[in-house]
Image (tube, rainbow, N blue to C red):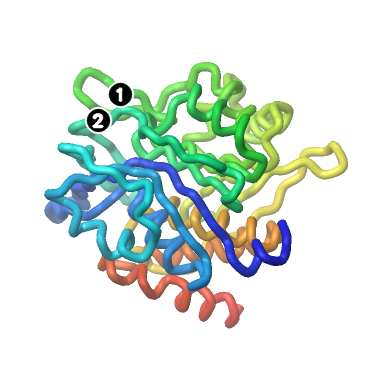
Amino acid sequence: MNLLSILFMKILVFGHSVIDKINYGKGEISKPGGIFYTIAALASIADSSDDIYVCTTIDKVNEKLFSPAFKRIKPNYISYSTNIPTVQLNIYDNKERDEKYENVSGNLQFNISDLNRFDGIMINMITGFDITLAQLKEMRKNYNGIIYFDVHTFSRGLDSEMKRNFRWIKDFKEWAKCVDIIQCNELEVKTLSSKTAEEEIARELISYGVKQIIVTRGNKGSKVYFSKNIFLTSEEIPALDVKPVNKVGCGDVFGAVYFYNYIRNENLIEALTLANIAAGTSTAYSDINDYLNLKADVFARYNKA
């Protein structure tokens, strides 16, 4: 990356916008979801000279919900649909959340020329149908930079009742060959291979050309696997000590902050540390507008450490 890119970055993000109907056991609330959290985090953490673009769809009914984040980025690749997906989320303290969908969308449609003008491309598989393998292969063929791939709901199938349950992803090898950095949580990583040991899964993915595999661990922090002098190695950062009031969008915030900082300076430890702080900080946010303060909150904690 040249000096001009460091001073002025262009980032392209792909992912569906959804409406989250969240049940914490104390009633249901509706919030903007999906790629909203990635964009909210990027818009906050980025410098004013950077350009953030997102390829997504929204609908007129819910457009205002997304405006706190979307009004701060370039709208060139935002399109409209009749209905965006709705996700029923049941959140638990001691186990993985349940997900049930309405209005599942097909893959995003895009025709973006000269992908190499972007310093990085981030794909967040919000619904699991955000981009097809054919689209990803074409993107890889035409793009020389870093492609970041958040497995997210791609790790979950879709049953006849529109519920999303974890499943093994068939032919994930073909997807892995097209990306540089993979993000997943402790359950999602198990869907990427027939192997069961996390370290062995990471070693397999690296053999396909993946440069980094990031595994987020909730209140246990995060770990990144990578190859160093042909040997598999890893770095691990503990979680921020914070009392959570929110458990939605934290992985998206983590990914956005890691990706932005890594492509800016290629300092893995610093990027991982900042991402961990950002994810932990976001668990203390109870209002969508709190994300406007993310950068200040993250660096206040980072500089204090």
Classify the position of the N terminus by image quarter.
Answer: bottom right
Residue corresponding to mark 2? 104
Residue at screen point 87% across, 42% down: 229
Residue at screen point 58% across, 19% down: 194
The image position of residue 14, as x and y in percent, is 43, 43
User: Crowdedness of circle 1 by 10 Å Cα count: few (<14), some, many (20+)?
Assistant: some
**Would residue 273 appear left or right of 25 to someone viewing this image?**
right
Where residue 141 is drawn, which disc sits there?
Answer: none
Q: Determine contact: label 2, label 1, CB under 8 Å.
A: yes
User: Crowdedness of circle 2 by 10 Å Cα count: few (<14), some, many (20+)?
Assistant: some
Residue at screen point 60% across, 62% down: 261
Residue at screen point 48% across, 22% down: 169
Q: CA distance from mark 2 to mark 1?
A: 10 Å
Of the numbered discs 2 and 1, the one sitting upstream in the chain is 2
Please state which amino acid type lies under the numbered disc 2.
Answer: Val
Please state which amino acid type lies under the numbered disc 1.
Answer: Leu
Is residue 240 visible to us here? no
Helix, strand or loop under label 1 = loop
Classify the position of the C terminus by image quarter.
Answer: bottom right
Q: Nearer the viewer, residue 166 or 210?
A: 210
Is residue 269 visible to us here? yes
